[in-house]
Amino acid sequence: MKTNIDLSLQSNSFRFYKMTIKQRALTLGLSFALFGMGCSLLQPNKSDYDVDYTIELDTIEVVDQIDPFPYRPSETRIWDLIHTKLDVRFDWEKQYLYGKANLTLNPYFYSSEVVTLDAKGMDINEVSLVQNGVRSELMFQYDGAFIKAQLPKLHTKKDTIELFIEYTAKPNELEVKGGTAITDAKGLYFINPLGEDPNKPRQIWTQGEVESSSCWFPTIDAPNERTSQELCMTVQDTFKTLSNGLLTFSTLNGDGTRTDCWVQDLPHAPYLFMMAVGDYHVTKDTLWDSLEVSYYVEPKYGPYARDIFGKTSKMIEVYSEMLGVPFPWDKYAQVVVRDYVSGAMENTSAVIFGDFAQRTKRELIDESPEDVIAHELFHHWFGDLVTCESWSNLPLNESFATYGEYLWLEAEYGRAEADIHLEEDLDSYLYEFNSGKSEDLVRFHYDVPDDMFDSHSYSKGGRVLHMLRKYVGDEAFFLGLQKYLTDNAYKPAEMHQLRLAFEEITGEDLNWFFNQWFFSSGHPVLAIEYSYDDSLNQQVIHVKQNQNMGEYPNYYLPIDVDIYYSNNRVERQRIIVDQDDQYIALPVIEKPLAVDFDAEKMLLAEIDNRMPIEWHLILGNESNLYLTQKEAVQAFGSYAKKQERAQQALFNSLHSDIWAVQVTALDEYETLMSLNPEKTIAELEILASTAAHYEVRSYALDLLYEGDNASIDLLKKSIIDSAYSVVYTAMNALIGTDLDAAIAAADTLQYDENPNMRLSCATAFALSGDLKYKDVFIELDDQLQSYDRIGYYVIYGLYARNTEDEAIINHALGRLNDAATTKDVWYIRFYAIDSINKIKDYYLEKWKNAPEAEKPALEEQLEKVESMLEKIEEQTEDSELKSLFSE
């Protein structure tokens, strides 16, 4: 999704490794049990010795390391679920699923006569044992979460049984709570079930992760369970269906319905089961003459399906060759759904995407879901083929899928583009870390599974895998992945199995790496200084580890250092940093022209690299790595006022071949303007018009506008840019520079299908307050969905106030009140309430300045708005939303 190991082996040995010297004296796990027992066992019995004595013990510090959350083990395997056969149909009005399940199981190891199944919020009509095709009803208990079926006899692991369960799933009657990464947990979703919203299709779809598949069928809902499946759906004949595996059977029923049966013979975890029903345009490609690759989108986006998903086949080929493991499933389909509860989900062979993925060809220029497509596809090896055995081991799924994004970008676009993405991962992790969250990657103590779906499991984990790759080398890295996938195919796994695969390939004990990075929290914080010893011909690197040593260890860091000599000679040496304050002397043949610490720029660390500007000038010119060039540009900005070469290098960086380096140079805008404003403006105008990357064009244009240097001609030219992000920037600048020109442009652009384009135009209309645009806002109210409504509520409120028309203000208040009280999404409610508050302030200000004769009418309107806010507050429980009502 795009947003686990033996405790005695991991927790005790590793936490000992993390402790300070004082903490090592006594771990909490032994402090009371062993210390108290040790006193009784080891202290001499005084009756045995007729001697008085005194033993003085050293004072020890006991550090409380009790985790506030319980230990979360892998699910205990009592029964093994072998095959799941489902036959389902739907009641759109009630939003029910009527299901029949046939489950084939056998005892995992120990004999058993009771089968316990996860089944949340269902009506259970029958539980039977099937023998030779004949059903015999069983006694069972059901508490709304678990079915406990009593078998007529004890079964051993050699026995295979089949259970039949008839049930009704009622997802909307479930009392479940989602989290941050997956915002709902009811498993089964009916979208626009009665067709009341003309702008939204009728759909059914499922979301199984983390343990929500058991909301729509009885199962053993754990990631270490695996089962083959057969799913038959009866739907209206106008709808298309999708599920895991292959469509093996489809028949018309003669009553306007059709039954489709999908079969997946290869076993996978129950949370990866899926189904989708809706009106879809299906585009199909074929890979390797047999593997079907298909894309399900709303009919409107049918012409763009290959623009959105068209690189999928190449991705499959790249990953298959890279990993040495061919794509392991029967087909690969991708479907877009409305109102999705997350970003995307790697359901085996049938991935679900939120509607953010549906874009026109023009929108894809700056809103491409390509990284998410790569992420979900890579899961089909890491997560689907080999699955984390528990949510504690989630990095085996999500860290790999995140790094899969890097591998695709590197293969398709080159290392610079991949490194840009990798830097974003580091920023994401550090933001979370600096916000107060510092966790082991593999962690067995958490509140709810959703807690694991964070920037540690995703972003930090991807960076850690990159470090592992750079440490062992590409050949060993991909052979290690191949061995891990091959050894654990179609099985659950824990992190130690990844380590063992790499150890077998490399011949090296890698506990130090896995303990330090996967079973530890934090990261190194390094300060680096340099000196040259002419008498010994040594380049000295002084490295300090400045992380909190009371909480984090001295890291063991193998790091590659490049030494730059004259005659274009570069020598690479590997050093080991393993002390908190360390001087490392490197033998050199002459005084280096430059030294590049962490030459591969692979370290997950905060680094203060105090190298001279002369080295940055050399490295910025010689290195082709994005991060090396970025650091150089930042140094140029710091030294540009002191050194002419740095100044020239800074201006030259505006035209780097790497677009993100150009952006870094633009970050030095104030420095550039202070050095040469005329040249800077000229350079920005060139970039705004001709830069290859849309982000550079947009940024340059925005800087010109912010500095009051954007010409009307340039803004008008930019309004027809191919990238919408540039058009938004130009429109915003034109609104602030020449509102009449902006309105004239908006009159032409308002019919664009892109919602953000329409909102940009609506902003110009809102500022005008012209009554002729009232229908624009009413139409937008009917057309905009999800995130786009944030801007709409802000802009409509602004327009209503600027018209000063009571009818329009009342209409706006009605729409805002509806959003503030009926919308489930927090951020929509927030901006709706905020806009109502601004209308209240409008009336209050108008009342203060009004003649006495007009005040009663204004008081009546003000009271109406205040009453509306009071009623909204009564229905509001969220503390952040409640803050909007404070005086």
Image: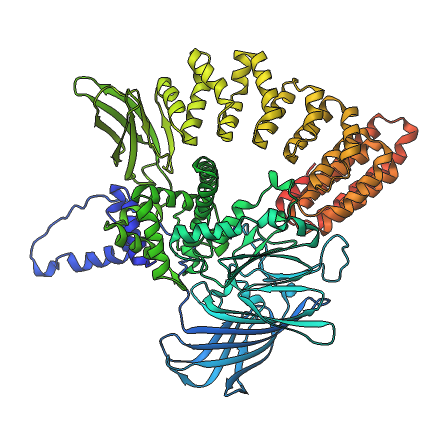
Q: Quadrant of residue 756?
A: top right
User: Which residue sits at x=54%, y=74%?
Assistant: 85
Q: Is residue 742 left or right of residue 123?
A: right
Task: Work out whether residue 269 can be spotted.
Answer: yes
User: Which residue sits at x=67%, y=27%?
Assistant: 718
Relative to 111, residue 799 above or below: above
> Percent from the top left, x then y, of residue 871?
75, 48
Relative to 123, residue 418 above or below: above
Q: In this view, does 40 lie to the left or right of 647?
A: left
Q: Is residue 533 left or right of residue 373?
A: left
Task: Work out whether residue 219 can be spotted.
Answer: no
> Percent from the top left, x then y, of residue 561?
29, 31
User: Which residue sits at x=29%, y=53%?
Assistant: 12
> Percent from the top left, x then y, of residue 473?
31, 43
Q: In which quarter of the image is the C terminus?
A: top right
Most foreground residue, 338 or 376: 376
Look at the image and name its color scheme: rainbow
Q: Is residue 531 left or right of residue 688?
A: left
Q: In which quarter of the image is residue 780?
A: top right
